[in-house]
Image: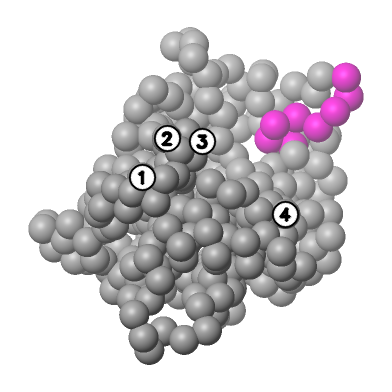
C-alpha cells in the first residue's frame, strides 16, 4: 500500500520461496526483493545462531533465503530482507549485513559460504535485516490503518468507502494466486503471470470500489418481504448472515463465477418489462435455477448464500 501511495511500479508475489517477493518495475523487472518475516512472542533478541544453524542438516533460515541469489530471478538485482518483530542480538534497527562489525560479518560469511554455493562477501551488500515496530497483537489494526491512509489520500477524508471490503478483495486475489503451485513456476515470466499482483490490478480495485460506492441494501425491507411471504425464521436468519458476503462477492470484479451466477439469476425472469416478481418469488425462482445448473460449482450451491445473492441481484437489476 505504501508503494502504491508512492506511485511505484511494482509486482508482488506471496508465499513464493519466501513470504513476500517484490519485483520492479512492473513492465520489465530488474530488481527482486525477497522478504522473510519471523515473529516471536518473546521479547528476547533474536540470536544470529538461530539464523545460521542447520538443524538436522536442513537449510538455515539465511541459507534458504540466499538460495534466491541463484534462483529464477538470478538475472535481477536480488536483495534479501529478513524482518523480525523483535530486535536481533546485533541490532535493534535496520541494517545491511555489510555494515556490521568485522567479527559479525565474518561469522555470517563463514556460515553461508559453507552452506550456499558461490556465496561471497559481495553478497553481504544484498543481505538486510529489518526490525518491525508493529506488535503481533496490533497487526490487524495496523493493516487497516494503512488501508485507511491509502483511501484518505486517494479519495479524501470523507470518502465513506468500506476499507475492509477492499482488503478482503485483495486477500481473495492473493489467495487465488497462492493456490498456483510454486514448484510449477519455471521462469520469471511465469512467476509474474501466475503468482503476482501488480500496481495496475490494485489501482483497478480502488477505482471499482469507489465507482461502486452506493447505499447498501435495506436489510429490514428484505427481511420484512421474506417474512410476509411466509419464510420461516430460521431460513431468514441464515440468509441475513450471508448478505454481506454475497454483496461483497457481487461487486468483486474478479469474481467472475459469482458474476455469471448473477446473470443466470437475472435471466431466470424472462421479461422484466412488466412489473417484476416480488422479492420472495424471485429468490425462490432464481435459486432453483442456479441449483439445477451444471455450470455452477458446488462451492456456491448453498441455499442461504444464493438466497442472499439473489436479493442483491434483485435490487441491483431493478
Residue 62 among those drawn in magenta: yes
Task: Locate the N terminus by quadrant.
Answer: bottom left
* Callout in the foreground (4, 1): 1
Q: Residues within 10 Å of mark 3 (few under 14, many from 20)?
A: some
**Tag 1 and tag 3, C-beta contact below 8 Å:** no
Mark 1 or 3 closer to N-term? 3
Report the front residue among 254 and 48.
254
* Callout in the foreground (2, 3): 2
Answer yes or no: is residue 234 visible. yes
Residue under the image location 26 percent in, 52 percent down: 221
Bounds of the magenta span? 56-63
244 to 211, vertically: above or below: above
**Tag 4 and tag 3, C-beta contact below 8 Å:** no
Label 1 – label 3 distance at C-alpha: 54 Å
Mark 4 or 3 closer to N-term? 3
Task: Locate the C terminus by quadrant.
Answer: bottom left
Residue under the image location 68 percent in, 35 percent down: 62
Residue position marked by numbered label 1 in the rendering: 227
Label 2 – label 3 distance at C-alpha: 50 Å
Label 4 – label 3 distance at C-alpha: 41 Å
Residue position marked by numbered label 3 in the rendering: 83
Q: Secondary structure at mark 3?
A: strand
**Tag 2 and tag 3, C-beta contact below 8 Å:** no
* Callout in the foreground (4, 3): 4
* Callout in the foreground (1, 3): 1
Amino acid at each position: 500500500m505504501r508503494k502504491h501511495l508512492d506511485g511505484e511500479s511494482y509486482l508482488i508475489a506471496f508465499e513464493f520461496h519466501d513470504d513476500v517477493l517484490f519485483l520492479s518495475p512492473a513492465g520489465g523487472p530488474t530488481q527482486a526483493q525477497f522478504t522473510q518475516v519471523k515473529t516471536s512472542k518473546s521479547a528476547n533478541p533474536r540470536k544470529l545462531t538461530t539464523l545460521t544453524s542447520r538443524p538436522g542438516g536442513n537449510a538455515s533460515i539465511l541459507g534458504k533465503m540466499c538460495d534466491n541469489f541463484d534462483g529464477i530471478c538470478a538475472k535481477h538485482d536480488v536483495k534479501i530482507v529478513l524482518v523480525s518483530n523483535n530486535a536481533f542480538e546485533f541490532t535493534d534497527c535496520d541494517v545491511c549485513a555489510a555494515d556490521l562489525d568485522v567479527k559479525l560479518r565474518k561469522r555470517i560469511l563463514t556460515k553461508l559460504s559453507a552452506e550456499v554455493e558461490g556465496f561471497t562477501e559481495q553478497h553481504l551488500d544484498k543481505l538486510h535485516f529489518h526490525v518491525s515496530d508493529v506488535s503481533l497483537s496490533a497487526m490487524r489494526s495496523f493493516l487497516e490503518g494503512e488501508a485507511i491512509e491509502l483511501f484518505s489520500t486517494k479519495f479524501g477524508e470523507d470518502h465513506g468507502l468500506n476499507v475492509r471490503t477492499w482488503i478482503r478483495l485483495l486477500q481473495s486475489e492473493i489467495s487465488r494466486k497462492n493456490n498456483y503451485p510454486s514448484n510449477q513456476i519455471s521462469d520469471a515470466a511465469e512467476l509474474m503471470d501466475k503468482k503476482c499482483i501488480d500496481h495496475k490490478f490494485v489501482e483497478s480495485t480502488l477505482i471499482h470500489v469507489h465507482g461502486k460506492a452506493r447505499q447498501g441494501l435495506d436489510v429490514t425491507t428484505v427481511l420484512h418481504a421474506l417474512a410476509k411471504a411466509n419464510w420461516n425464521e430460521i431460513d431468514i436468519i441464515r440468509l441475513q448472515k450471508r448478505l454481506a458476503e454475497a454483496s461483497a462477492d457481487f461487486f468483486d470484479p474478479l469474481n467472475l463465477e459469482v458474476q455469471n451466477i448473477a446473470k443466470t439469476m437475472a435471466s431466470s425472469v424472462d421479461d422484466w418489462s412488466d412489473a417484476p416478481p416480488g422479492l420472495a418469488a424471485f429468490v425462490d425462482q432464481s435459486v432453483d435455477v442456479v441449483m439445477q445448473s451444471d455450470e455452477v460449482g458446488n462451492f456456491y450451491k448453498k441455499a442461504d448464500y444464493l438466497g442472499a445473492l439473489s436479493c442483491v441481484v434483485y435490487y441491483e437489476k431493478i
